[in-house]
Amino acid sequence: QDLAGANLKVAELSNADFSNANLAGATLLAANMVGTRFDRANLQGADLSRSFLIGSTFHDADLTDAILANANLEGTDLSGANLTNVFWVGAQFKDVNLTGANLTGVKLRGVDLSEAILCNTTMPSGDIANRDCPYTNTSVGIRHFIFPQIPDGIDLFLGVLVGATLPSPPTSFRFIGS
């Protein structure tokens, strides 16, 4: 779909599938796009200000230079998305998945990322955030992950282990508040 430069202001686009679409420079101002798929879409320079994107997916999408001012992104999956230089002011980020996303140069005014999922996420400073990765080689803050098997040598900090199989015998675990 080539919708480059399209004017879709205040459009009802809930549950639409724009996977692989070209929406570069499109105006989606105040559009209702709940549950919409933008996987691998080109949204470079698109204006999604005041849009409702609750539960939408943007897997590996390119949103370079896009505008998402005051957008509602609750539960949105932006894993692997290129968000370079995106303008976010007052956007809502509850339960937003930013795993593997690139936020280099992003303007985050009035944005709270405390409830966003950050794992292998390139932050605006260029630093990599791994706060919410299921496990790494060092101590981990695990909220509630389901592991079929826990790797040996991991620190579990405040972990909830559901259906986990621990190596027998466990040789190098530390359970802190688990």
Image (cartoon, rainbow, N blue to C red):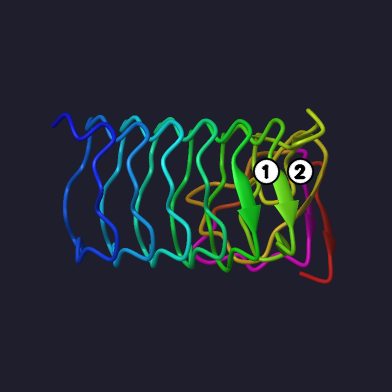
State the residue at coordinates (57%, 58%).
Answer: 69
Q: Position of residue 136 (x, y in %)?
A: 72, 37
**How far across and how far down the image is residue 172, in percent?**
82, 42
Amino acid beneath label 1: Tyr
Left or right relative to 91: residue 178: right
Snapshot quadrant of residue 40: top left
Structural crowding at the residue carrying mark 1, measured as other residues with C-alpha within 10 Å and reported as few (<14), some (14–19) or many (≥20): some
- Which residue appears at 22% of the width and 37% of the height? 19
Amino acid type indicated by mark 2: Ile
- Residue 106 % position (x, y): 68, 39
Relative horizontal placement of residue 68, taking residue 9 as reference (left or right): right
The secondary structure type at the circle numbered 2 is loop
Q: For numbered disc 1, what is the local secondary structure?
A: loop
- From the viewer's side, name the closer residue of 174 and 101: 101
- Which range is magenta? 153-164
Residue 175 lies, with reference to residue 132, above or below; the image says below
Spot the residue most to the left. 1
Would you place residue 135 above or below residue 125 in this image? below
The label shown at residue 15 is none
Residue highlighted by disc 2: 154
Q: With 58 as the anchor, is 7 left or right in this view?
A: left
Q: Is 12 on the left-hand or right-hand side of 105?
A: left
Tell me the CA gap for discs 2 and 1.
7 Å
Of the 4 image quadrants, the one containing the N terminus is top left
Q: CB of mark 2 within 8 Å of CB of mark 1?
A: yes
Mark 2 or 1, which is nearer the eye? 1
Q: Nearer the viewer, residue 61 or 8?
A: 8
Residue at image coords 40%, 63%? 51
Q: Which residue is mark 1?
A: 135
For disc 2, the neighbor class at 10 Å (few under 14, some 14 to 19, many from 20) is some
Residue 169 sits in quarter: top right
